[in-house]
């Protein structure tokens, strides 16, 4: 479900980019263009291209909200901090891999036999 919505979201994003780039520049977006007076000062009528842009924008927002809801449901209220404090799952004892020591995550001390960080001389 999440992958389908994500693919639709990406297609909508690319379509929105294409439609915006295809539209005629109104001039004045960056202060470039003609003067602001006269009969041309009102809002121009909505063209089919601008209506399609609004439609793609609304669909993009809907898929964004849908992806947020789906990912929130997948997390099931478990935060990253809860995952750190929880005990790791038991590893398969048949493979011979030791269980990692999560209590000792600090680098080795000066007296340990592990290699130390080189210092500038």
Image (cartoon, rainbow, N blue to C red):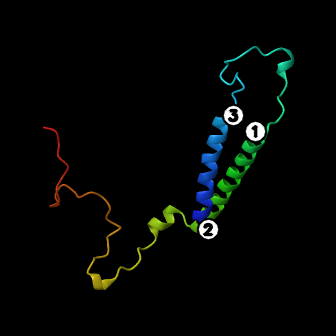
Q: Position of residue 29 (x, y in %)?
A: 68, 25
Q: Which residue is the site of mark 3?
A: 23
Which of labels 2 and 3 is toward the front? 3
Q: Which residue is the site of mark 2?
A: 1
- Counting residues from the start of the chain, the first of labels 2 and 3 encountered is 2
In this picture, residue 111 sits left or right of residue 101: left
Residue 85's image quarter?
A: bottom left
In this picture, residue 10 sits left or right of residue 104: right
Element at label 3:
loop
Query: Quick check: 54 above or below 63?
Result: above
Query: Quick check: 71 above or below 31?
Result: below
Residues under numbered marks 3 and 1 in contact, where contact means CB atoms less than 8 Å apart = yes
Q: Which residue is the site of mark 1?
A: 50
- Counting residues from the start of the chain, the first of labels 1 and 2 encountered is 2
Q: How many residues crowd around disc 1 within 10 Å: few (fewer than 14), some, or many (20 or more)?
A: some
Element at label 1:
helix
């Amino acid at each position: 479900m999440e992958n389908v919505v994500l693919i639709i979201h990406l297609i909508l994003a690319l379509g929105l980019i294409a439609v915006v780039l295809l539209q005629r520049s109104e001039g004045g977006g960056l202060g470039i263009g003609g003067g602001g007076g006269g009969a041309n000062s009102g809002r121009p009528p909505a063209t089919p291209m601008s209506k399609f842009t609004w439609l793609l924008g609304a669909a993009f927002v809907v898929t964004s909200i849908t992806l947020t809801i789906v990912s929130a449901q997948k997390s099931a209220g478990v935060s990253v901090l809860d995952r750190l404090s929880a005990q790791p799952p038991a590893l398969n004892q048949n493979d011979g891999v030791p269980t990692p020591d999560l209590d000792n995550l600090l680098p080795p001390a000066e007296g340990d036999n592990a290699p130390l960080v080189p210092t500038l001389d």
